[in-house]
Amino acid sequence: MRIVIMGTGGFAVPTFERLLESNHDIAMVVTMPLRGTRSGKTTPVRNVAMEAGIPVFDPENINDPVYLQQIKSWNADLFFVCDYGKILAPHVIGASKFGGINLHGSLLPKYRGAAPINRALLNGEPTVGVSVIYITPEVDAGPVVATSEPIPVFADETAVDVEKKLAIIGAKLIPNVVAQIETGKIRPIPQQNGEASKAPKLKKHEGEIDWRRSASEIVWQYQGLQPWPKIFTTCRINYHTDSKAKSEKQTRLIIGRIRPIDDNIACEIIERFMANNSGAAGADIVPGMILEASSQRMIVATGSGLLQIYELQPEGRTMTSAADFLRGHPLAVGQHFGKDVNGF
């Protein structure tokens, strides 16, 4: 078959490489134009195309009617679309013999939209998967032609890790789908729209930690918001000025790896904190309060449960371990991350 690949990001690369190894003819790669002027800047799909010697077409808007005759001139049998960045208009979809198929990072109809993997992790989904659908003008609503088995999400996996796994799984599905389309044996199954959920683009403000949420929910937030926008909080930190005097500044901190504390250990930490701070002003534990801050570990209270923070990144600096951060910016037990809150 004569295939045109439409993709930009890394999720499309394993399937692109798999199709390059097949006996199909990759006629063209359509990708998003490069942004900015940084020398040598590229994108994953563009990079593979250039290495393979496949021509690249990168219009600002593939749906502009001015490009229709050019698209038709490719004589494509099929469009394969994955991680492209544009929704195809009907006249574009109709410019190939068999229309287009899309590899989507969820078990549809759940998580239709631009960020299915991130949204699944943000919601604490225990399993994820991929679907292959025929492309229709409605976002991710076309009939399903293949799905993967659900695969588990592990406690230490972020959206970056899960995307890599799902991209490889998807690459194994596509050759069989293409073969079924070519032989007329494909059997599309309409989606159940009543079971659909949305996965809109991520927004920067979603990274702010609300310490009133549970430890598990904050971990889901960390997992789902990698590599962007990451999770962040604020804290008052002492800095040395040029005169070596200390000045206190409210600082934005990106929080790196985190993990919930086991309930039994959490009880021991809380009991020790209360014993050491009995009768002290502000000794009541509230969400965002630092309960331990030592070279061994940093422990923070949440709305339900405790979190251990392994990495932090002050604004304008690099990510560092909690121990290294505390050596440069000592934080006191009882100090708060985030906004002032009441109750625990």
Image (cartoon, grey):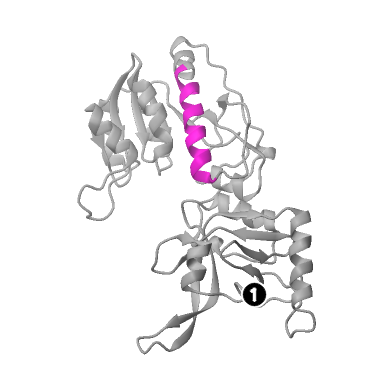
What is the magenta segment's predominant secondary structure?
helix
Q: Is residue 138 visible?
A: no
Q: Quadrant of the C terminus?
A: bottom right
Instruction: Judge whether residue 179 is colored magenta.
Output: no
Above or below 266: residue 25: above
Number of numbered discs: 1
Percent x, y of residue 124: 66, 47
Out of 318 and 279, give the one closest to the viewer.
Answer: 279
Out of 71 and 65, give the one closest to the viewer.
Answer: 71
Q: Is residue 37 left or right of residue 22?
A: left
Residue at the image position 52 percent from the left and 29 percent from the top: 133
Above or below 65: residue 290: below
Asked which secondary structure carries label 1, the reply is loop
Percent x, y of residue 79: 39, 27
Residue at the image position 66 percent from the left and 43 percent from the top: 125
Residue density around tag 1, few if under 14, some if 14–19, many if 20 or more, within 10 Å: some
Part of the protein shown in magenta: 158-175
Instruction: Judge whether residue 168 is colored magenta.
Output: yes
Percent x, y of residue 190: 61, 27
Residue at the image position 78 percent from the left and 61 percent from the top: 267
The amino acid type of the residue labelled 1 equals Val
Residue extending furthest top?
183
Out of 87 and 295, give the one closest to the viewer.
Answer: 295
Out of 59 and 295, give the one closest to the viewer.
Answer: 295
Above or below 129: residue 290: below
Percent x, y of residue 215: 68, 58
In the picture of the structure, the residue carrying the numbered disc 1 is 333
Residue at the image position 53 percent from the left and 53 percent from the top: 225
